[in-house]
Image (cartoon, grey):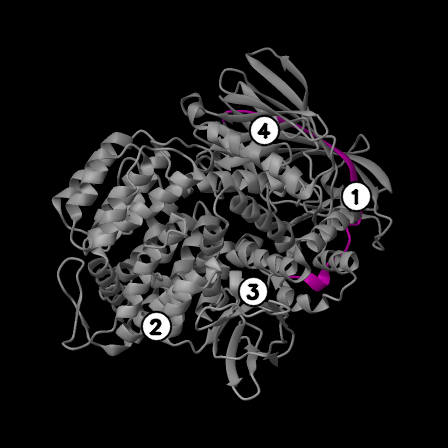
Amino acid sequence: MIYLKDYKVPNYKVEKLDLDFDLHDSHAIVQSETIYYKNPDSKENNTLKLDWEELEILSIYLDNKKLEKIDYKIVLGDLIIKNTPNKFILKIKTKIYPQKNTRNEWLYTSNQKFCTQCEPEWFRRITYYLDRPDVMTKFTTKITADQTKYPVLLSNGNKIKEWKLDNNKHYVKWYDPFAKPSYLFALIAWDLEHIEDNYITKSWRKVILRIFTESHNISKTHFAMESLKKSMKWDEDRFWLEYDLDLYMIVAVDDFNMGAMENKWLNVFNSKYVFASPETATDEDYSYIERVIAHEYFHNWTWNRITCRDWFQLSLKEWLTVFRDGEFTADMNSRAVKRIDDVRYLKNSQFKEDAGPMAHPVRPSAFEEINNFYTITIYEKWSEVIRMYQTILWVEWFRKWMDLYFKRHDWEAVTTEDFLSAMGDANNIDLSQFQTWYNQAGTPVVNVGSKYDKKLKKYTLLFEQSCPKTPEQDTKKPFIIPIKFWLIKEDWKEIKLDNDLIILTKNKQSFEFKNIDSKVIPSLLRDFSAPVTLKYDYTYDDYAFLMRYDNDPFNKFEACQNFAKSILLKIISSGKISVGTGLVESVGTGFKPVPTEFIQSLRSILEDDNLDNALKAELMIMPSETEMANIISKWVNPLKIHKSRKFLLNQIATGLKDIFKKNYHNLKKDYKITPEDIWDRSLKNVCLIYLTYAIWSSLAYSQYQNSDNMTDTMASLYSLSDFDCDERTKALDDFYNTWKDNTNVIDKWFSIQATSRLENTLEVVKKLTSHKLFNIKNPNKIYALFSAFASANQVIFNRKDWEWYKFIADRVIEIDKFNPMVAARLARSLIWWKNLEEKLSKKLKAQLLRISEIKNLSWDLREVVDKGLV
């Protein structure tokens, strides 16, 4: 266990680091030459402790004197040299084996290419070093390799020399003039081609932009390049942040555990977030590519130039970048839809994490395995906290803080306290209560009541906040919670208010509004102004009114969602749902759980010409099975949830079939990649899904046959996926034959089958594990097949025969032997046994216990399993 309270400044700092890589077919020789100097802020004696794991040491020289084994000590995790001078040069030569490395971390090979991933603590498996984010220095990197096999040799910085050697070898030397921590080091050796473009900054500097990949994929990189230039322009316009280098490089690789890595000068990307063409990428893929490209670019300022002091501050590295990429995406597309998408993901995933055994604060006091700390809480919840700052301070004051923050801490390693101090100083305001968001886990619950005094014309809102218990945190202090709101008269006449923001700071608070001459309906938590669960006793009529008349897009969506959730909970708890045929479910005689006003409110949305089609599409998407399970939380029966949701969807499809059909046919048009065309496709394909629920499988198959883009193709396959029909089989077979040579597209084929609700899905997935195109060593394939099933197909995963639990547990055990990070991620699908009804709960827990009893589990997996069993 690593504790925040144990942090000490490094005993030594690094003036510069020269790296020399000699790459061979079976191994690599790494020589590091480092100038160390005593840290004046350290009170420790002159002892150097370097981090290391799995290194074969060949030689060590201190100031040109070779050290014998008696001169240093190697213990688990540390190389220790005592009585070191105040300044000295240390040369270390090591031998490592990238070809045997299956974890896709530190220096590894995949499909005969060398690649690195050093975040968070993997540079220590390349050479002995002070592998911590608060040690920054300038890197020089020389790479030597076979010129035929590895014609392209890349690293951080500017290329300062390239030379041909004997035996068909060559070397390239790179120099990075900007100090960086070791986790930002990158190296690529491969047979690559690249596209090149340039960007002229606001100060009229020319920046060369290059995207590298294999030759057969080069044509799919142009959208990524355009996204990069958009990101650079947006960052200058919004935050006045200009790129500081003359070269920016991206490399796309297939075998990568994460989405991308922001290494200074040289970003390494999972190829799925780079490659795009209308034939191979959906509109959602395009959006993800644009966002991830922007995210890694924005990291240049947050947090390459300003980095985190230690890994407890990881949220500090990610939150502002996630917030910035979210704002970028909102400006490039639909701000309302972006907000809805973000909150839907937050509620389905982060709220679930907050309510489970892996719940943790955004800045914890301790952790076991840093890889397990890269969570939805770190990325998404903390981004919402930043949004709260902006809500309270307003945009212009938030920007004032940003300017001070960059001025004060540029090229420093900082803490959350530094961040909070800059925020307060810039705006002359006390924001210390925000510390509760750093230190406390869990999703706050805000219960709201209201009362109206007709005689006094006074309306009162009463708020009570609380936070459920989380691991190691039973008692919680009150959070600071901004509640954006509005009061709406039943006749829809405007009520003039002095302020539309309530800021909660105590467990209980009330707020009075005078001169209110009639009953009002409150629109609360507008734009989802805080990451909380808000509860107010709305009636069905209130929901219908807000769906039609609330002018806040998010709260219009929220009213629709909450109305649907109320209906679903009524169906689930009734016990009257019964199995029908196909996708049609029936209920007991005389039981009519879906109110007419709900269907009519949805109709009014579809007929409203003032709403764009993107928002209409979002409003038609009902709460997911995952979110309903999160709401029920105890004694969950996934089959009941699934049947109840199918019944609701069928009722909507039947009641609105005419307008779905009209919209579907009116929105069919030639393919273009513009926001408006994307919005139209979104609504068209939502209509297709509902029409398919009305037993129109032939319509989905017809769209598949006539599709000229991947968005429409995947919508057709998704619509057909739960039908056991000839059209489904024909479409899947045709899709495979068309795209079997494209590894990223074929992942979609795996996922669509893994998420099918058909009874034979287990047998299908088992068969797919032996498919010639499935490679269990590739993380994307694991996510596409196993994670898609275990996370997104709860009704089949939790079948009464329980065979799926064992199947996924077996895969976790298997994957842990070669890629612990991915195994730990997959294992999170097994830790929700406490939420399930008794029989399912016991069977799922048994699989966790079985994994826990295995010797030599990785630290990554051990932590997830142990916490899951508590």
| Residues at discs 3 and 2 in contact (Cβ within 8 Å) | no
Magenta residues, start to end: 1-25
| Residues at discs 1 and 3 in contact (Cβ within 8 Å) | no
Q: Earlier in the sequence, mark 4 or mark 2?
A: 4
Q: Which residue is mark 3?
A: 530
Q: Which residue is mark 1?
A: 13
Q: Which residue is mark 2?
A: 566
Q: Is residue 64 above or below residue 495?
A: above
**Residue 550 is a magenta residue:** no
The nearer-to-camera label among 1 and 4 is 4
Tell me: 540 left or right of 759: right
The nearer-to-camera label among 1 and 2 is 2
Residue 118 appears at what percent x and percent y?
59, 41
- Give the residue type that dot 1 points to: Lys
Residue 42 visible in image: yes
The one nearer the camera, 20 or 765, is 765
Q: Earlier in the sequence, mark 1 or mark 2?
A: 1
Q: Secondary structure at mark 2?
A: helix
Q: Earlier in the sequence, mark 3 or mark 2?
A: 3
